[in-house]
Image (cartoon, rainbow, N blue to C red):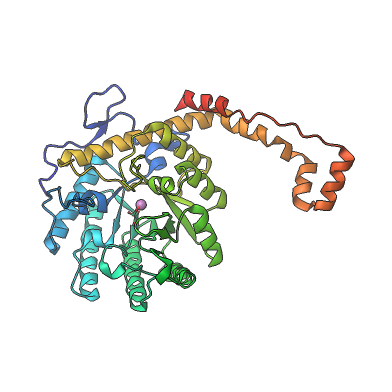
Amino acid sequence: MTDFFDGIPAICHEGPESDNEFAFRHYNPDEMVMGRRMEDHLRFAAAWWHSFAWPGGDPFGGQTLDRPWFGDTMDHARIKADAAFEMFAILGVPFFCFHDADIRPEGRSFAESLRNFEEIVDYIGRKMETQRTRLLWGTANLFSHRRFMAGAATNPDPDVFAWSAATVKACMDATHRLGGQNYVLWGGREGYETLLNTDLGRERRQAGRFLQMVVDHKHRIGFQGTILIEPKPQEPSKHQYDYDVATVYGFLKDFGLEHEVKVNIEQGHAILAGHSFEHEIALAASLGIFGSIDMNRNDYQSGWDTDQFPDSVPEMARAYYEILRAGGFATGGTNFDAKIRRQSLDPADLILAHVGAMDVCARALKAAAALFRDGALERARAERYAGWETPAAKAMLDTGTLESISASVLSRGIDPQPRSGRQERLENLWNRFA
Ligand code: XUL
Ligand code: CO
């Protein structure tokens, strides 16, 4: 037990009229939405790194946050875990996510780091026996330490590849041991700064082999969860190999992994890639690789991955609409890969950031579900493509050749007439719900 969150009550649903700051207005875990409990739709997770490991620094200044668990000893790591589980209980989040480096102090050698890690994983395992919070996913931090400055799997030094592979093995084993439902690989420093020193073909092949080994290890240890890649276009490196969903899909196909690996899509990363969040989700769903989401938002002016908590219901409703269309989450969930601002010093700020974000997502889910149930948008879309449902159009697509199609155009004397895309009408429809 720590006293860090003293005075902060467990957060309960009090409904939209409540003026209690420490309450949910919209997130009501047991409320049924399209035949599923809201908690089971949203599958919220808290991220260890932003909430408990981040000191509040930015490119111009260091630590602003004062936490009793900041320090390099195992005692600090245990206090950090205590506080983390206290926050999970206050919020009632069903899941959490972590990197190895978030939960354990770095040792003087690989072996010492591994011992520290395994000890804390056991400690977390014991906490999970008495608390209902589950592990959504584990991952390895292969980007913070200077040894990874030129990449992990894509490093020019084979010893860094080896170090990274051994680290991922430890993190996958720990995720498996803790009953994790997914294992995530975010590219981190898998990219490059300048072609002058980079052989990008070689680096891409290294990344492909690395991922094949990850999938192989999953099957070796009998891990039933999903392996997820998290696309991001730039930052930290100028060119990241896992740019966006489309790029990752091509990469997976290239290495024969498109049926083994799915994607964890982050709102801020989608925006950095010049897409929208819902575009990335819809594309992944259509390719059969939608897995999970990292929920946050960027500052739309700064152009940085600012990892802020989401605050826009209409934007998030677009995302949840696509998730509902895709049939909802299977092993995935909504991980708050989001951090408070560096001036938000109080323990209450950390709690209320999550409370607000959970309410935004809940409201967005309800709006999306109402529109989905209404069906008008799906009907309009189906109507737009209705021509393709005729036997002749289907046959053209299945077995047509340019010759046969040309002959048919001449014999039928067709003269296609443009039809309205009705965008504004559909936007009006959308705005009745979100
Ligand atoms: C970095 C990022 C990571 C991953 C996990 O932008 O999103 O926190 O989610 O490594
Ligand atoms: Co992320």
**The C terminus sits in image quarter:** top left
**Residue 86, x across and y down, in percent:** 19, 46
- Residue at the top extreme, as displayed: 17
> Residue at position x 46%, y 42% from top?
276
Position of residue 205 in the picture relative to residue 301 (left or right) = right
Position of residue 159 in the picture relative to residue 286 (left or right) = left
Residue 30 visible in the picture: no
Q: Is residue 352 above or below residue 374?
A: below
Q: Is residue 390 above or below residue 264?
A: above
Residue 164 visible in the picture: yes
Quarter of the image holding residue 356?
top left
Q: Is residue 36 above or below residue 287?
A: above
Quarter of the image holding residue 340?
top left
Q: Quadrant of ligand 1?
A: bottom left
> Residue at position x 44%, y 70% from top?
203
Q: Nearer the viewer, residue 263 or 95?
A: 263
- Residue at the front extreme, as displayed: 196
Quarter of the image holding residue 353?
top left
> Residue at position x 53%, y 57% from top?
249
Position of residue 145 in the picture relative to residue 375 (left or right) = left
